Amino acid sequence: MDKIALISDIHGNIPALETVLSSIRSRGINKIMCLGDLVGKGPEPDKAVDMIRESCHLVLLGNWTI
């Protein structure tokens, strides 16, 4: 059975995203689904998008608007 992690509301916060992804991997979770809001407030939106593309099986559109 697959273990699935759900993440959301990253908002370009790379240190937090790195910590969460590391924790997910250390638990042997093999599928990550992102529920949106990759960008919007944080300083590194492009890097957040790239990291999510590499790590997640599914990415949904969040509710953040500019």
Image: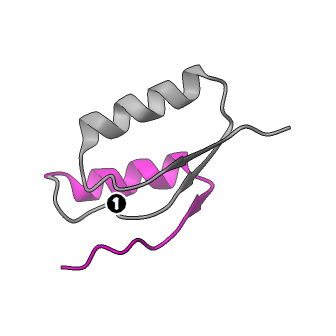
Q: Nearer the viewer, residue 62 or 12?
A: 62
- Position of residue 58 measured from the top left corner of the image (x, y, whole percent): 60, 61
Q: Position of residue 43 (x, y in %)?
A: 13, 52
Q: Is residue 16 left or right of residue 43?
A: right
Name the residue at 36% across, 75% down. Answer: 63
Q: Which residue is mark 1?
A: 38
Front-lying residue, 2 or 51: 2
Q: Quadrant of the C terminus?
A: bottom left
Q: Secondary structure at mark 1?
A: loop
Residue 38 in the magenta stretch? The answer is: no
Q: Residues within 10 Å of mark 1 (few under 14, many from 20)?
A: many
Q: Name the residue located 53 percent from the left edge and 45 percent from the top edge.
A: 55
Q: Residue furthest toward the right?
A: 1
Location of residue 65 (image quadrant): bottom left
In the rendered image, residue 54, in percent from the top left (x then y), is placed at: 51, 48
In the picture, measured across the screen, residue 13 lies left or right of residue 48, that is: left
Residue 44 within the magenta-colored segment of the rendering: yes
The scheme the figure's colours follow is: one colour
Could you say which quadrant of the image residue 20 lies in?
A: top left
On screen, residue 37 above or below 20 = below
- Which segment did they paint magenta? 43-66
* Residue 18 placement, left or right of 31: left
Is 21 rendered above or below residue 36?
A: above
Q: Which quadrant is home to the N terminus?
A: top right
Q: Name the residue at 19% across, 52% down.
A: 44
Q: Is residue 46 left or right of residue 22?
A: left
- Would you place residue 1 above or below residue 40 in this image? above
Vertical relation: 7 (above or below) 23: below
Residue positioned 41% across, 47% down in the render: 51
